Image (cartoon, helix red, strand yellow):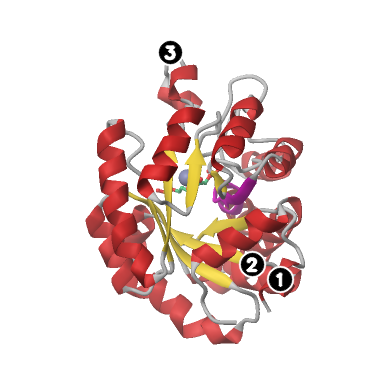
Amino acid sequence: MPLLSGKVLFEKANESGFAVGAFNFNNMEFLKAILEAAEEEEAPVFLQTTESALRYAGIEFLAGMVHAVKDEFRVPFALHLDHGRSLDTVLLAIRHGYTSVMIDLSDRPYEENLEITRKVVSLCAPLGISVEAELGRLVGIEDNVESEEELLVDPEQAKEFALRTGVDALAPAIGTAHGAFKFKGEARLDFERLRKVKELTNMPLVLHGASGVYYEYVNEINTFGGEIKDAKGVPDEDVRRAVELGINKVNTDTDLRLAFVATLRRIMSEEKGNIDPRKFFKPAMEEVKEIVKRRIRLYGSSGMASLFL
Ligand code: PH4
Ligand code: ZN
């Protein structure tokens, strides 16, 4: 299956009422784990890189790996720029064969976000590249904000933004946050707000900051020398509900990091005489593959590759 435009993935998911898993990668180990998991689950996926991934590994390596292996896999996938912060990064991604981009100017004034997003759409649409944008802001407990409410998406504004920009997908802030520390107490997602955004836009929606931050990995990390206290993620039932209410792409990065690091910490402490990194990385990569499969099943996208034949 060729590398597809994100447009195709977004449209099929929206039509059929499931979410495509979007997984971040910064190296070969994560990319291989994600693709193998998708293949085993027969699920479409977004392979995505942020600007910090590009600073870490270089776009030539990250995009180069995807283009080099794309014909080895049968499942449909898109190469997506996650949280692109400028027109320059979008242009860089276009030059490197990305099939989907996110332009994230959610921390800028509304009109500025709108104008630049419009420009990105006018560049990407003729090339068949999908565009995702964000409205409202994602904040974690580290950000110390006084009023979370005013950072959440305004559904009427989402409708206007979608019409005026022509974006293919919208990421509405409904209370999630990036990283392993998402909530102080119980998880609180604003489902009513999500329902309203879907009703008013009827377009593909994206959930960022959706990791489950599973206890078993947090516990393993803490047991083998790590220190991550008060970690908290989005419960599986909340992710399921968000998909039922119209989320069509779910971003997951932290869960993959936790799986990888937990396994590394355990094996490094068990095999003190080993200096071959492959002996650490291989099982860590396998664990990333397991968590990707688990998340794909949660999003209802297992078996959905057949829709693209
Ligand atoms: N993302 C991933 C953001 C990763 O700069 P960086 O590479 O560290 O950024 O867009 C998510 O929405 C991931 O959500 P999660 O943290 O809940 O997995
Ligand atoms: Zn995100």
Residue type at mark 2: give it.
Pro
Instruction: Determine the residue positioned at 47% across, 76% down.
Output: 66
Residue 255 sits inside the magenta stretch: yes
Q: Which residues are magenta?
A: 247-257
What's the CA distance linking mark 2 and mark 3?
A: 39 Å
Percent position of residue 133, x then y: 41, 46
Q: Of callouts 1 and 2, which one flags the residue occurring earlier in the amino acid sequence?
A: 2
**Residue underneath mark 3:** 146
Crowdedness near tag 1: few (<14), some (14–19) or many (≥20) residues, C-alpha within 10 Å: few
Residue 130 vs residue 208: left or right? left
Residue type at mark 1: give it.
Leu
**Residue underneath mark 2:** 44
Residue type at mark 3: give it.
Glu
Image quadrant holding the N terminus, namely bottom right
Residue 243 sits inside the magenta stretch: no
Tag on residue 307? 1
Instruction: Determine the residue positioned at 40% across, 39% down.
Output: 161
Percent position of residue 270, x then y: 67, 57
